[in-house]
Image (spheres, rainbow, N blue to C red):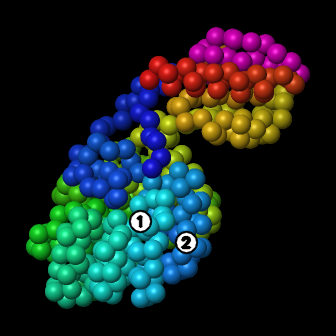
Amino acid sequence: MSSISNTSSHSASSTLPPRYKTKQIFVGKVPIGGEAPISVQSMTFSKTRDIQATKEQLDRLALAGADIVRVAVSDLKDAHALKDLRKISPLPLVADIHFRYEYALIAAESMDCIRINPGNIGSKEKIKAVADACNQRGIPIRIGVNGGSLEKQFDEKYGATPKGMVESALYNIKLLEDFGFSNIKVSLKASDVERTMAAYRMLRPLVAYPFHLGVTEAGTMFHSTIKSSMALGGLLMEGIGDTMRCSITGELEQEIALARAILRYSGRQKQGITIISCPTCGRIQADLVSMVRQVEARLKHINTPLQVSVMGCAVNALGEAKHADIAIAFGHKSGMIIKEGEVLKKLPEEELLEEFVSEVEKMAKERATQN
């Protein structure tokens, strides 16, 4: 699991409302809800029965900083592969199952969590069997409501609306509770921002279970970044959400990077470098785009929360960088390093970047020692 720091930075203290208090559950050793940090999830795209290919993707996600990973269980071969896959997985695993309750029973023998929609599993006897199996091993069930595939009774009455999603969730929660099962987390995903946010907001005061946030079918990196930032970022800033996935039609690592960025910029996670850079304009006296990319690349290993400012000219450098922990400002063939609002060094341009990286690393070590 990734280390998530709550260390304060040089910038102004947060005015965010507190997170909603929820029941705490565990997916493997990862706590979700209660006072636990908000965890980040993703999902493999390999056939789960291909253990080697799936393991390679799990390793990639672990390296990228994922906390939990979901794997698809589409048939019996996938289900029977779960036990061996769990033995070699570097991360807790969630088995994603639809319609076939017998796959859930197999998954419950080795997985850390089961994701189902109880409404499409079948009879109450089948739902009870899954709940009993998960209760015996102490593993949670994620109730996954999807706005595009509501049960018939809710779709006919409410359509694919937030109200229909919430009623589906409440119905499925009660199904499990009626069988003595309360080790639950809930997701309410739609493919657009408005319905997603409305559904989570509507359900939040009605239940005490932790929420898994996500926008389903969010699209490519460009579209998912916008949808996920608006919906998930907005909910997080309101105090809603305990674990999350940014769904992207793209590379696995992109999901983790985007989720971590949303957590940072929503103020819910204090970890790593936050880059502030001025927009391109006629005053720029250096190749700012290149410099920002180099700064990001050179500092990506730092986990200590720091506000880092990159300025393209000296005109507004002191004012713009005043609230950053440390800043670099480029002038004509020279520049400044500014630490906590004060000019630390003036250097030729060719020396500036190396010295700046050194100063940021030094500050990160100092802050880590202090905390």
Whether residue 332 appears in this view of the structure is no
- Using residue 51 as the reference point, say whether residue 295 is left or right of it: right
- Amino acid identity at mark 1: Leu
Q: In terms of depth relative to the viewer, which is nearer, 83 or 206?
A: 83
Mark 2 to mark 1: distance in Å? 11 Å
Q: Which residues are magenta?
A: 325-348
Kind of element beneath mark 2: helix
- Amino acid identity at mark 2: Thr
The residue tagged 2 is: 54
On screen, residue 67 above or below 362? below
The residue tagged 1 is: 93
Q: Identify the residue at image location x=29%, y=85%.
A: 101
Kind of element beneath mark 1: strand
Which quadrant of the figure has residue 121? Answer: bottom left
Secondary structure mostly seen in the magenta stretch: strand
Whether residue 33 appears in this view of the structure is yes
